Image: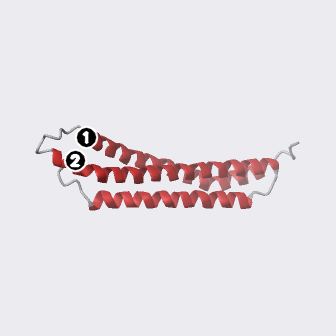
Amino acid sequence: MFPDTPSVSQLSHVISQAAAPAFLLGALAAFIAVLIGRLNRIIDRTIVLNGIADDDGLKSRLKADIPRLLRRTAMLNRAIYWSVISSIAVTLLVIVAFASALLQIQHERGVAILFMTALAAFAVALIDFAREVRIALSEFDHYG
């Protein structure tokens, strides 16, 4: 069934190797929280703009901001998606590391692939986030 139980030194080694992915997982959680916060602000703004009557001459021009808000929402949704994919890859990486230590099997290639997958997904999320920030900063809300 199971090979011999791993020694304390083997488990200690796995735990020390899992520290970096654990920090990455914490960073991803904080990043997702920032993305969700920004998304909530955009949704709130969109709700307010959609609540403006079309016959309100002073405020109806503010509705011109809705397409920009929808573009930002799409980018943030993609960034959240890729951040979650990255988080799942990091979680699987830690599970594989501990399972392979328990079963005493080689895991270097699998862990490397999972880590590269996590970082690639995180990079895509950061790119979408940068694009969203660029739109937010380059096309200000001109009307308040």
Image coords of residue 58 (percent x, y): 11, 45
Identify which residue is drawn at 50% across, 60% down. 124
Numbered label tally: 2
Res. 31 in view: no
Type of the residue with mark 2: Lys
Which disc, if any, is residue 22? none
Q: Secondary structure at mark 1?
A: helix
| 89 shown above or below 112 | above
In the image, residue 40 lies at what x, y percent? 36, 43
Depth check, front residue: 6 or 140: 140
Amino acid tagged 1: Asn
Q: Secondary structure at mark 2?
A: helix
How many C-alpha atoms fall within 10 Å of the one at disc 1: few (<14), some, or many (≥20)? some
Residue at 81 percent across and 54 percent down: it is: 105
Q: Which mark is residue 63?
A: 2
Q: Say the numbered circle drawn on residue 50.
A: 1
Residue 77 spot, x, y in % from top left: 44, 49
Kindly indicate the quadrant of the structure image that contains residue 116: bottom right
Is residue 76 visible in this depiction of the protein?
yes
- Residue at 52% across / 57% down in the picture? 122
